[in-house]
Image (cartoon, grey):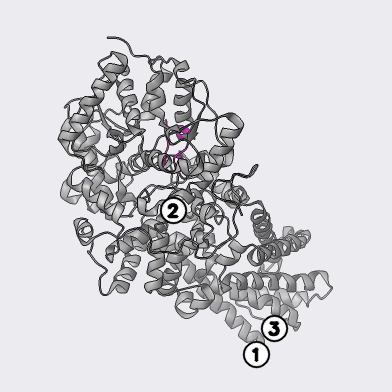
Amino acid sequence: MSLISISLIFFFYISALIFISGLSYKIIQYWKTPAPLKIPIAPSALDKKGVFLRYFREIFLFASLFKANKWTWLFGWSFHLALVLLFFRHLVYFWPGEVPSILYKTEPLKYAAYPLIFGLLGLLGRRLFVDRVRYISAPSDFLMLIVFIFIASTGMIMTFANNHPNLLMVKNFASGLITFNWSELPGEIIFLLHIFPVFCLIAIFPISKLLHAPGIFFSPTLNQVDNARKKRHLSDWASKKEDDLK
Amino acid sequence: MSTDNQIKLPTYVETPSIRRDSMAGDGPFKASVEIQNNLGFPGEKVDNWQEVAINKMAETKSKYKSVQVFLDSCMKCGACTDKCHYFLGTADPKNMPVARQDLFRSVYRRHFTFAGKYFPRLVGAKDLDEEMLDDWYNYFHQCSQCRRCAVFCPSGIDTAEISMAAREVMNVIGVGQKYTNQILGKVKKIGNNLGMPEPALKDTLLDLEEEIKDDTGVDVKLPIDIENSEVLMVSPSADFFAEPHIDGLIGYAKVFHESGVSWTLSSYASEAANFGMFIGNYDVMREGALRIRKAALDLNVKRVIIGECGHAWRVAYSFWNTLSGIGGGAEDEYALRLQDQLDSNYPQPQHMIEFTYDLIKNNKLTFEKSNNDHRVVTFHDSCNVARGSNMGDIENGQFILPREVIKAACNNFIDMPKNTIKSATFCCGGGAGLLTDDLIDLRIKGAKPRMHALRKSEQESGVNTLAAICAICKSQFSKVLPNYDFDPYMVVSVHQLVSDAIVLKKT
């Protein structure tokens, strides 16, 4: 096997390890940190069903962002939706063993690349040209978008500009990562350029702003039921203060 | 460029281009040694303040899920950047909610994250140095913790939580704000924000009884420290002396009189306001709540009702059950000692608006609405009520109930533009410990979005009365309205409207 294949395979496992251990650490941290006070934000949910519906609106529709800014919503929502669709499109490569027939029908999903790049360029445009957004942007915020744009572009060049790498090799390489049955990386450099930054993103997920993905589920403003008068809410450290009063 | 007084229609407030450092400065007056020590904080900035601050940050983020999660999950989308009234009024970019959080977040990143430790410039991580601390003090006292930004954040990030955490860290290193901490000292010593002692309070109430008698010919009482009353009424102490607040207090008294429900104020717990929330200190906030608990137990009341005060209602509605067991549904012995005494047929605590609303719905009150016909009323949703509480335990009750009470007492009610009310309401500009003269410039500028909306309603619908249910809003508006060419006396308590229209039974 070529050195570059070995290096990339090695890098993938390092990234995956950082991803799994780092993300687990953060999720456990979020889970365990107490929320001593009830701080739901209006329009707050009066019961658990309301909280569920609220998350549905936030996760699938970006409801708050829609209220906040229509352009950011359009770019952000297109980008995220396209990302999900393209994930499903890519499953066919990673699927170990016999591929379910439904995954062969995902080919039209490749067109999600257009809303993806549209959203990314829009978000980059806002960072560059809206003075408020430019002010709050750190170099890493630009870099993150540029990396995504790079991944999207290389993917589109392979798919739409007739630069397909050897798909059988792609399939063997990608599913080999999952099954620990490693095989050679396809020779086309464009494939390498596409997949390397993806591995980078996997690695930096738990140490970057990509943490907004798990974070939203732990936001007390969103996940708390607004029932403070009806049910006593007490965290461990706060309840200890009452020991001397009992 | 528009000046403060010039109103451009049809947009209410244009989003300004950023003007760096336009609100740079030293911030509000700092608390003296005595004021700080009184609350158990160091009197002066401690020698190893950086170390103490970083340790306090670590402690705070381990005790508050909000702080830990919010520091990590901002993706810098910019949704909040044009939502803060202080940014809209000042154009200082550090008044954009995300930029305000970033003052704290950049230090968090530097000291607590891998990327910030090894690649600080890449991710905007910064050391906590003198300059940063000055920015903290200045800009975390340009936040009224109104939470408007949080309504629009796709991650639910609430700048108020960060602002409270930052003020807590500053207090712990000995850098406190004079106004807030001085007031907290008065509550601790005397029982109310004004430092009004018991005899003065009792005199005031007697004067008010006489005033009502002269006006109406009816003996309406303002009882205090009466054991075994049905209701303990806790109102902001501004209701005892400030205009227009005091007319609201008269309104409560008339409503209680008509209801036939016995009620009492407490000289021990003569303050609904709880500035402990503003400085993010759980113990100080709890101490305030425990005074109410003690008064409720000592006076052996069945219900606790809160007067018109915005953050007090948030603390009472959302926090009291946690802090001191004033509420319902507890299973522990400590809270049950009080909750077994309280009448579980009613929500505990209740807002005065809820009490009046229930009476109106049950046709227990009679109004001569034409008494308010000289008024065209609009309602300012106070931020803490609007975004941090509920009323009536129905969805959006905190918006519905006050409006229904106003409409029961007035013929002419008009809402301000849709994006400036209810959950999107603009802060008055004086909340969270900023209602002090040393911040008057900020207060005037911060009121701008609300003033623009009011001007639009004045021009389109002839609005001449601004009703509110928050002591801070009322004081702030009375002060800044003239700067926008409005009559300062157009501010009223909702219960003043009730008071002016209610028909008292001549018994």
**Under tag 3, what secondary structure?**
loop
- Give the residue furthest to the bottom: A3
**Under tag 1, what secondary structure?**
helix
Vertical order, B241 against B142 (above or below): above
Q: Nearer the viewer, residue A31 or B156?
A: B156
Q: Is residue B346 left or right of residue B69?
A: left
Nearer mark to the viewer, of 2 and 3: 2
Vertical order, A242 against A125 (above or below): above
**Under tag 2, what secondary structure?**
helix
Asked if badges 2 and 1 are on one and the same chain, I answer no
Residue B260: tell me if it is visible. no
Residues at marks 2 and 1, CA–CA distance in whole angstroms: 66 Å
Vertical order, A159 against A217 (above or below): below
Q: Chain of mark 2?
A: B
Q: Which quadrant, please, contains the N terminus of chain B?
A: bottom right
Q: Chain of mark 1?
A: A
Residue under the image location 61 percent in, 73 percent down: A143
Asked if badges 1 and 3 are on one and the same chain, I answer yes
Q: Which quadrant, please, contains the C terminus of chain B?
A: top left
The residue at which mark 2 appears reads as B441
Bounds of the magenta segment: B381-398
The residue at which mark 1 appears reads as A3
Tag of residue A184: 3
Q: Nearer the viewer, residue B99 or B208?
A: B208
Residue B116: x and y, percent? 47, 75
Kindly identify the amino acid type of the residue bearing the numbered disc 1: Leu
